[in-house]
Amino acid sequence: MYLAFAIWAKKYTKRIKPDIGCQGSFDIIFVRDYILISGGGISLVLTMANFSQRYRPPVLCSVASYKLFCSTTWSVGTFSLLFVPPAEGGGMEINMLELPESYTISSQIEKNLTGKIISYIEVLQAPHRFAFFHGDTKSYGDLLEGQTVMKATYYGGMIEMDTENCMVVFADGAYPKYYEDIKKFPKKHQLAIYFDDETAIFVSIQMYGVIMIFPKGKCTEGYYISSSSKFDPLCDEFTFEYFRSLYPGNHKKITAKAFLATEQRIPGLGNGVLQDILWDAGIDPRFDMREASETDFIVLYTSVKKILKEMCEQGGRDTERDLYGQKGKYVTQLSKNTLFEPCVKCGHEIHKANFLGGAVYYCENCQKKSNVHLGSR
Ligand SMILES: [Zn+2]
């Protein structure tokens, strides 16, 4: 995610404010390809289509034009934002659903909640600026009340829970949590699905999250279609040839992180699971893929399959929580939990940097930054 840039961008809100005619303070966060600026009673969504991901000195040095959407009316205009990518350091972390968590939580729903009858739906009990609902929220109750949970599945980082006639999709920070004890029901939430046996699923969003409720098979949201139509890295169809074909091969610079974790090339593989995959492959997130040999591609492919499988088998990462609020049992090698700890392969200290708008962790000794660098050792 681009939160590191968001932190940087906060410093420059003073420059942005006069442009959008707004007073007061702003929160700026990033959602996939969008920048969200929130404050002064309005929310603005800027597309990041022209966002350059190259490092630049920390001074204002380029002007980019962005399409501007006003979330209250969704009217489109043009907006200019003085922009500079973040320098090293900083970075902020948020918990987002990625493949191991969607796999774990959807299995838990399928195993333990099928057969439950939905009695009541509550939407936005606590308002949240970055709770994104798709489908007609006014129809959510009519669609779901009286329906029985039939099954659950995952597509990339998305969780889909199906009833006889409907589908409920959770994505990004919309973690569904299940509660059996009415006394423990959360006080604030953006979505509640109550069952007729006095249990319930709640979604309480921290940063941002997406919830989609549609008649079954009627979800036309691009992100859902894209996630559900691509091969799952856990499946046999996700072959090396398929993985290799995902590489753009247009001779433009693309780093290992950008290759694996952007453009929805591999749904559910985000900045979280990326860290251990690259550590396992011995490749630095900043490695220029133009230098990659066929062996590098094979090694990367093997690590993608292997690490995601391990994470799923162990109920998700130990930095994330499942349907019951329990931490996963997969011990992350590179995460906020292991910063400045010794690498278990070589003993070198794990470091952190800001890269492509999110924190990356790395072991300098185990992960090559370039072939030249490796050769010089
Ligand atoms: Zn190491």
Image (cartoon, rainbow, N blue to C red):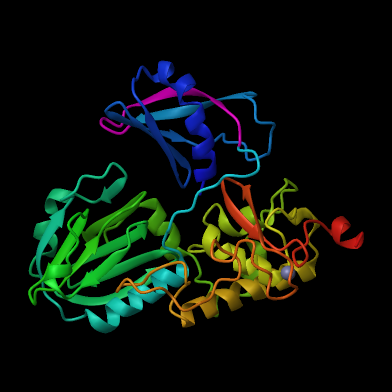
Q: Quadrant of residue 357?
A: top right
Q: Is residue 277 above or below residue 37?
A: below
| Front residue of this view, candidates 292 and 208 | 208
Question: Where 34 falls versus 364 (above or below)?
Answer: above
Question: Does 77 appear in magenta?
Answer: yes
Q: Nearer the viewer, residue 334 or 36?
A: 334
Residue 4 visible from this viewpoint: yes
Q: Quadrant of ligand 1?
A: bottom right
Question: Do we see residue 270 in this rendering?
Answer: no
Image coordinates of residue 243 in percent, x first then y, are: 63, 67
User: For this view, does 39 lie left or right of residue 80?
Assistant: left
Residue at 21% x, 77% y is 150
User: Is residue 132 shown above or below 172?
Assistant: above
Indicate left or right for 98 with 150 as reference: right
Position of 132 relative to 269 (above/below): above
Tell me what residue is drawn at x 31 percent, y 67 percent: 160
- Residue at 72% from the left image edge and 45% from the top image edge: 252
Question: Depth check: 227 or 13 in front?
Answer: 13
Q: Quadrant of the C terminus?
A: bottom right
Left or right: 337, with 350 as reference point: left
Magenta part of the protein: which range?
70-85
Give how far across and how far down residue 330 sits, in percent: 50, 77
